[in-house]
Amino acid sequence: MTRFFANLLLMVCCALSAAAAGPDIAFKETTHDFGNIRENGGPVTCAFTYTNTGSAPLAIITVSTTCGCTSTKFSPRPLAPGKSETVQVTFNPNGRSGEFNSLITVRTNVQGANGKKKKEILKISGNVIPKK
């Protein structure tokens, strides 16, 4: 019986170490509030810093937004383990008065628990003060 539990423990450890191999991503922050911004003040930008916390190169495959008022910029180059990079997000308030919330979906080469590629959701928000 002891041998059975020892084998079971060995299989669990092997499975956990196999799951830990590969890239992984951790964002320093996943939300940004621009606060009050003026509609005629021009676009505003923030940066979301992420780190490859895995053991293999991390690649961002795509970054998409929920609104045409939001654009992004990111490096398509693979990121080495332990290194950090940013996803820049720009919001254009022109023609958009009032409160806003926009989601940014970051798709990576990280293998998720469900067998699909992992995605991270970032969020920007704020309040656009209309031009007079």
Image: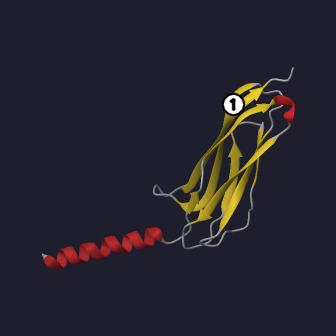
Look at 64% across and 52% down and name the residue there. 106
Residue that sits furthest to the bottom in the current view: 3
Look at 63% across and 59% down and name the residue there. 50
- Identify the image quadrant of residue 56: bottom right
Q: Nearer the viewer, residue 131 or 61?
A: 131
Residue that sits furthest to the front in the current view: 36
- On screen, residue 12 above or below 93: below
With 38 as the anchor, is 98 left or right in this view?
A: left
Residue 112 percent location from the top left of the image: 50, 58
Model colouring: secondary structure
With 124 as the anchor, is 16 left or right in this view?
A: left
- On screen, residue 82 above or below 29: below
- Identify the image quadrant of residue 69: top right
Q: Mark 1 points at which residue?
A: 100
What is the secondary structure assignment of the residue under circle 1? strand
The C terminus - image quarter? top right
Residue 86 percent location from the top left of the image: 70, 58
Look at 83% across and 27% down and name the residue there. 95
